[in-house]
Every structure is written in C-alpha cells, then in structure tokens.
Amino acid sequence: MSEPPAIFVLTGAGISRESGLSTFRDADGAWAQVRIEDVATPEAFARDPARVHDFYNARRAQLTSAAIAPNAAHLALAALERRWPGAFLLVTQNVDDLHERAGSKRLLHMHGELKRVRCARCDASHSWDAALDTATACPSCLLPGRMRPDIVWFGEMPYHMERIGGALRRCGLFVAIGTSGNVYPAAGFAAEVCGRARTVELNLEPSEVASQFDEAIHGKATGVVPAFVARLLAAWKL
Ligand code: OAD
C-alpha cells in the first residue's frame, strides 16, 4: 500500500449550521439580515464602530451561550486528525471556536476568531469573551477606543496564507466542507490543487466552484462528514 496522502480540509459556515450558528449566504444567513458594507469592512468600522461592535458582540455572546456546541462533523474531523498517520491541516473560514472545542489541534483560522480582539494601534491580539465597545482599552498599550474584533474583513488579507500555501502545495487529498465558494482566496484552493491532489466537496448543495472537484457528496454535514471520515479510515485500514 502506498503512503497515506497529506490531507488539507477547508471548512465554512455550513459545518456549524447544525450547531445552531447561521451561515452567511443561505436564506436565513447573516448577509440576508445585514449588509456586508455596514459591518464587515474596514470602512464600515471607521464610519460607525458602534454598529460593527453590536453585530460581532451579538455573535460572540451567542457563541458563549450553553446552547452552542460542536456537532458530529466537527468531532469526526478531530478524530480524523488524531488517527491519520500522514500530514493533516484543517483550515477554517469560520470565526467560531467549534473545531477547537471538538478537539482539533492542527487548525488555522484564516478569517480570524470571534473570541479574539485586536488593537488597531499596537496590533496586539487578545483572547476575549465579553462585549467590546468604542471605549474599550487595549490590555497591552492601554489606549482606549481602538479595539476591534480580530476578524478578517472584506478588503483585508486573510491570516496564515504562507502556511496555507505550503500545505496546499503538499496535499494529496483536498476536502472542502460547508462552504459556498463565493469568497476568495479560499474559493480558489480547489483550483490551485486540481490535477495534483484528489478533491472532494461535502456540502448541502453544489457550491459555486463545484466543477473544480473530482467528487461531490451532498447532504447535511452531520451525516456526510462522519460517513466520509469512516470511509477514508476504512480504505486505509485505520
Ligand atoms: P456561506 O454562507 O457562503 O456558505 C455556506 C454553505 O454551507 C452553503 O453552500 C450551504 O449550502 C452550505 N450548508 C448550509 N447548511 C449546511 C449543512 N447543514 N451541512 C452542510 N452544508 C451546509 O458560508 P462560507 O462559504 O463559509 O467571511 O462563507 C465564506 C465567508 O464569507 C465567511 O468566512 C465570511 C463570509 O462573508 C467573512 O466574514 C470575512
């Protein structure tokens, strides 16, 4: 038997939907309630920081509520990481912490994290569970009024792109889960590895970039992700 391939998993909001967190572009998603231009750009924050804080404070509060927990799909990916003998990297576009709560370790948040804040003056990033407001002082430089959610907004560079690029070049199996393929650079990862790595899409419906995948499995994440992981481990007798 040949060597187990290096695995690259990309996740999006669809994997957390069954944990009770809304997606962005579904009919009941975040971008149906508010406009991206009002809450998710540096210009929106410069124009009306209180409005932006309200939006992310509500999402952070929801995430810290007892009702939200990792689901079977998050748990299956953590189990795959533990049992896989080859290289493994999980890159998420999600700003929730459900992958780490499920036990994932080799994990990068390319769009930032709801439970972190960053100072626009000194750039220090801090773990944060509470609400932010326009007067909050930075725990590092102590300046008030310059704290922002540590979220990558539209027009900003996603985090960890160097490590992500390296893992994409090395992977032999690329799996995208619960992402609509609307937001770049993540939406371009499948095209980048296409021809070198096997590509599999697990999503409720075909994504915008479905043609870039060798295989598509449609269904809810809590069903299709554990089944896919079980099939992969069985194929490699793990
Ligand atoms: P989207 O809301 O664009 O897409 C979510 C995808 O998940 C859709 O294709 C749904 O069909 C699918 N889906 C919904 N429920 C599902 C379920 N139970 N199981 C499996 N799939 C399901 O979310 P993302 O692609 O993650 O960025 O969005 C990418 C980025 O756009 C986000 O990180 C965010 C957003 O604007 C920033 O805020 C910077």
Image: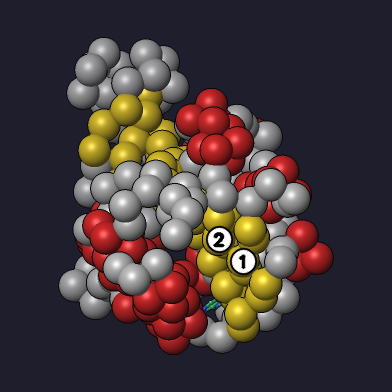
The quadrant of the rendering that contains the C terminus is bottom left
State yes or no: Cβ of the residue under disc 1 lies below 8 Å from any atom of ligand 1: no
Question: At label 2, which amino acid type do we have?
Answer: Val
The residue identified by callout 1 is: 200
The quadrant of the rendering that contains the N terminus is bottom left
Q: Assess whether mark 2 and mark 1 are in contact (beta carbons under 8 angstroms).
A: yes
Q: Nearer the viewer, residue 6 or 155?
A: 6
Say if 163 sits above or below 235 in the image. Answer: above
Ligand 1, image quadrant it occupies: bottom right
The residue located at (32%, 21%) in the rendering is 124
Say if 167 sits above or below 203 in the image. Answer: above
The image position of residue 69, as x and y in percent, is 26, 72
The secondary element bearing badge 2 is classed as strand
Mark 2 surroundings within 10 Å by alpha-carbon count, few (fewer than 14), some (14 through 19), many (20 or more): many
The image position of residue 62, as x and y in percent, is 32, 66
The image position of residue 156, as x and y in percent, is 61, 32
The image position of residue 162, as x and y in percent, is 53, 26
Q: Is residue 118 left or right of residue 182?
A: left
Q: Is residue 148 left or right of residue 193?
A: left
Question: At label 1, which amino acid type do we have?
Answer: Val
The image quadrant of residue 101 is bottom left
The residue located at (66%, 65%) in the rendering is 180
The residue identified by callout 2 is: 175
Mark 1 surroundings within 10 Å by alpha-carbon count, few (fewer than 14), some (14 through 19), many (20 or more): many
In the image, farthest residue toward the right: 211
The residue located at (67%, 34%) in the rendering is 155
The image quadrant of residue 141 is top left
Q: Is residue 130 left or right of residue 212?
A: left
